[in-house]
Amino acid sequence: MGYKARFKVWRGDKSGGGLEDFSVDVNEGEVVLDIVHRLQATDAPDLAVRWNCKAGKCGSCSAEINGRPRLMCMTRMSTFAEDETITITPMRTFPVIRDLVTDVSYNYEKARMVPAFSPPADLEPGDYRMAQVDVERSQEFRKCIECFLCNDTCHAVRDHEENKTSFSGPRFLMRISELDMHPLDTVDRREVAVQEHGLGYCNITKCCTDVCPEHIKITDNAIIPLKERVADKKYDPIFSIASLFGKTKERARRTPPPGKNA
Amino acid sequence: MTDLERHSYDVVVIGAGGAGLRAAIEARSHGKRTAIVCKSLFGKAHTVMAEGGIAAAMGNVNSKDNWQVHFRDTMRGGKFLNSWRMAELHAKEAPQRVWELETYGALFDRTPEGKISQRNFGGHEYPRLAHVGDRTGLELIRTLQQKIVSLQQEDFHATGDYESHIKVFAECTITRLLTDESGAIAGAYGYFRETGDFVLFESPAVVLATGGIGKSFKVTSNSWEYTGDGHALAMRAGGSTLNMEFIQFHPTGMVWPPSVKGILVTESVRGDGGVLTNSEGTRFMFDYIPDVFKDKYATTPEEGDRWYTDPDNNRRPPELLPRDEVARAINSEVKAGRGTPHGGVYLDVSSRLPAETIRKKLPSMYHQFKELADVDITAVPMEVGPTCHYVMGGVEVEPDTGSAKVPGLFAAGEVSGGMHGSNRLGGNSLSDLLVFGRRAGLGAAEYVESLGESRPQVTDAMVAAAELEALAPFTTEGGENPYTIHSELQESMNDLVGIIRTQAEVEQALERLEGFKARVAHVTVKGGRAFNPGWHLALDLKNMLLVSECVARAALERQESRGGHTREDYPVMSPEWRQVNIVCRADGDGAAIVRQPLVPMREDLLDLFDVDELKKYLTEAELPKGAH
Amino acid sequence: MATTGIESPGRAQIGVKTLRTDRWWIAPLLTFLALTAFVVYSGWRVFSNQYYFAEPYISVYYSPCITTTCVPGSGFGDGFVSWWALSPALLTAWIPLAFRFTCYYYRKAYFRSFWLSPPACAVAEPHGKYTGERRLPLILNNGHRYAFYLGLLLNVVLTWDAIIAFRNSEGQWGHMGLGTVILVANAVCLWMYSLSCHSCRNAVGGRITHFSKHPLRYRMWTLISKLNTRHMQWAWISLCTVVLADFYVYLLASGRISDLTFF
Ligand SMILES: Cc1cc2nc3c(=O)[nH]c(=O)nc-3n(C[C@H](O)[C@H](O)[C@H](O)COP(=O)(O)OP(=O)(O)OC[C@H]3O[C@@H](n4cnc5c(N)ncnc54)[C@H](O)[C@@H]3O)c2cc1C
Ligand code: SF4
Ligand code: SF4
Ligand code: FES
Ligand code: FES
């Protein structure tokens, strides 16, 4: 194998920028990140890019390739035709820093607003007992490598900057879901999910699920179940009445102290 | 010193991997205002890549396990060159550290009784590795990250500021540690990758948790972060490193396609039943069981296979020998012409486990091969070969406190040395991070406490010097591109100070290193200071060169083969050399080494071993009295 | 939309709504056409108030037929709603409509294809503001479970319709025609669609945190979860069978064809 591929790479910073053309060698088995590295070693030594593991494990190399949010290290060159021009841009939902690097601090701020895991106060380390079937749902969500591609692709913030204050994006709705399903957690985050994290912004259009490199079923397994659990509490009078009769003692959870958005 | 940002903290932790985060949690829990500084984003440190598990003798799967057994396994794995005190603390405290993770929210895989499940791994006598599928490192780092967030939330409720007591400075590289006239730590100097702006942390205590050095080698499982910064920072601040010749080549890295060469194939593949075969279809590991392990490993495939279901009455298969043995065996097979088309050997689970089980137990391996190599591991064998994985050597520390030889400097995790001796067992690193991360955080907090009001001061002259040094690549002209030097360095280290070494080759490497040094002094970078990877590499290269020189010098010095150091010209392990640590310090613009005797092992620990076993490692004089 | 979304200050200035090179617009276009066709067809049939009963088959849109104006034999007894002058279908057909309108899958489908919010992933939507499902009327989507419960009742009725389709026009058991097969298939598909519903998944077990303490519900949840992964497929299949079942009855009732009888 081995051919020259045509690339367009977005270069610039917040003051402006544009797509630059490159023609680069491609060898068998390479991924897009290899090509970016080759550019750095040859034509563009100061081309800014984030990466760490080059094995799809750290979630650093998120970008948009031919308009689709993807990990550069997990996008094989063999998925493109040899005569195709491949366009790489930074993620378009977050402010750009330089070239392919964006400012993802939005995500870290939202992460900080999710009330943390709270185990029962009297449970000693070493005494935790959890059944495998009870941890499995949350384990799926803990596969998340925080590439933030889901938050990048979610139209609620991608297309509406102003929603960033009130909506935390799929990644953190999933985090709430994860804690809600944790067998030993004692906090009820359902009200927080709606009030502070904007659960209602999600219109279940599933783009987050589409792009997740970990193949987590974000919408089906995290967000919709969370919406249903919220409905149990907020929108379902019958269920609320039933719970008065103690039918749902599973749900003896505290409400957390107010956070920043409260 | 135009655009210098200044911060003042009680403790500065450099590194946000398992060790750094655990240290920061401890320092903050002791009321110390703590900064965490790291080169990547928060939550992306190298620890995230760990796969197989975290070793702790909890005895959940086999109740015969306890700290003594774990201690013995660790010492054997390290060929008795370990700091026995560290190995002891590690074996004793690892279970508590793992249980603690559950209180932070970690969700390990479970046993039927609901306890943490544990899996088999090379060199561990019992199933001992707590794990989450094959993404244990991710779980570890995310858990610690979320614990830090929860501490920040507590601070927010108390003070109205999330960052009042613990703050993360992500994408910030420390280039120099600053000391006062007495040599005590006064602060750390670095730059923000995003902007290129400089930053000064004034702090009496610095915890190094910067990880390893693998990026000096061509074929490696390590990421760009592993440029030996912590090792170099410590040595330049007056500290020392030890055992740098011991580098772990993991036996199973991917070999094809070239762009992924070196990426790790977790040992769990073998722990869960995978076998190694050569191009002739032979399970060759049976031919490579060394004498010291003769009675611990199965001699026939049948016995080895029985062990998976009946470990009490059978010996384990030799695929699960310590990593150094397996890596050398693969190397020999390939050299003898029995390798695969791409220069590795076969690692097969497809014929050993049902496809469904493989996908369940090894999900990331399944994906990694599917997506990077277009290989379905449930249907065909993988091709694997050794890859540079871990450095056993590191900053010399006090076992109990993690204190390095510089007042105010602490080190923990892969950057510290001693714990693993000449070879690390799989799973012992993640536990090491937690045990010694906590201890270093505590050590730092106590040190700060002991200082009272009189803290070492940073001088303007030092700051100015640090700035000059960091800007040098912009001021030289007509020099080389750092990428070229980097790839030549990697090639040299891989070929000349790699898995098998000889005097002539190592000498040649040292010669080349001299050449690189001269060239690095003149590298030139293009562009500005904002997120400029060329500049970053130019600065990192200096650290790689210093550390590589330590590795090469120590490798030349040690005339024996042991663990992660194999000398073709000195193929046997020597009890005399076991009594020696090789210590490396910065010396002018290079490195200098000295020999240093090992502290003899405490009597009660020595008693944990069979005298017959001790005889394989120790000199006559060191054996317990009455054992002759 | 110039200053919001992907053109917001601070973000990389790229200038186009999407750089996707594939034909991303096909899926929303097809969905739009299919759903529009369905709505038009259903509207016509529901309002037409004729050709909905051909002994022993009743159209899904008109079952249960509860007004006194129902075609003889088609209703519940003689019907009990006497004050209703319009098409009897209007009294019941809103149930499946509400069920499907609030369905998590159809929400995805119409948000993407009708409201273009977003038209496809990583393709900018044309609206300046977006508030999601947080206000009236869309907040009512949170009550999907009620539509689901009603939908289940309706399924029971339609299943009964399928059962009595095994009687011939004289009311004797032992008949089976193409109409019987179609009604049975329709009922089965409706059940699959309803059981694979996300609210169903939550109700049978999703809402519990400790599966290990509820082994039976866990088993049910596992089963429903499997069906749930195919919810979209069942949504479309059942949509087609509904149209087919109604159209077949229409053809029979309007005398265009006669039933193919097997025995
Ligand atoms: C693929 C792979 C799989 C592994 N699997 C296992 C396993 O199953 N079990 C096991 O026990 N071990 C495993 N290991 C080993 C183990 O993961 C590492 O040894 C361990 O994670 C190192 O952790 P650490 O905390 O020391 O450093 P790291 O996690 O590497 O963190 C280093 C930190 O230091 C920061 N840093 C470095 N230099 C600077 C600087 N100059 N300025 C500021 N910050 C800096 C980095 O940004 C980073 O945050 C594996 C390793 C690899 C590569
Ligand atoms: S499903 Fe919801 S959270 Fe996911 S991308 Fe769509 S709107 Fe965003
Ligand atoms: S959920 Fe998936 S897409 Fe979103 S951040 Fe995590 S890994 Fe990335
Ligand atoms: S570099 Fe780690 S995910 Fe791509
Ligand atoms: S019917 Fe579709 S989700 Fe309930």
Image (cartoon, rainbow, N blue to C red):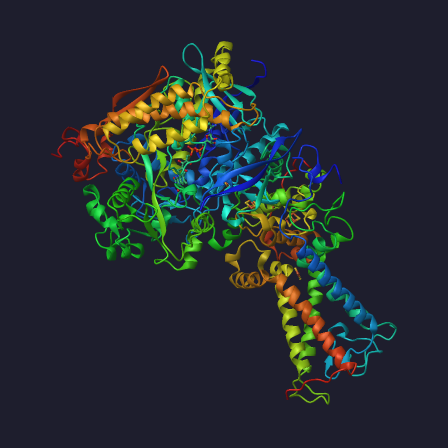
**Rendering coords of residue A250 (x, y %):** 58, 53
In the depicted structure, whether residue B294 falls above or below residue C55: above
Q: Residue at x 33, y 32 (%)?
A: B419
**Rendering coords of residue A85 (x, y %):** 58, 44
Res A161 seen here: yes
Q: Nearer the viewer, residue C261 or B293?
A: C261
The residue most toward the left is B628
In the depicted structure, whether residue A72 falls above or below residue B396: below
Quarter of the image that includes the C terminus of chain B: top left
In the depicted structure, whether residue C218 falls above or below residue B99: below
Res A122 seen here: no
- The part of the image, by quadrant, that contains residue B330 is top left
Q: Nearer the viewer, residue B417 or C48?
A: C48
Report whether A251 appears left or right of A123. right
**Rendering coords of residue B291 (x, y %):** 18, 42
Report whether C102 appears left or right of B50. right
Quarter of the image that includes the N terminus of chain B: top right
**Rendering coords of residue B265 (x, y %):** 39, 45
Q: Nearer the viewer, residue A236 or B481?
A: B481
Q: Residue at x 24, y 45 (%)?
A: B336
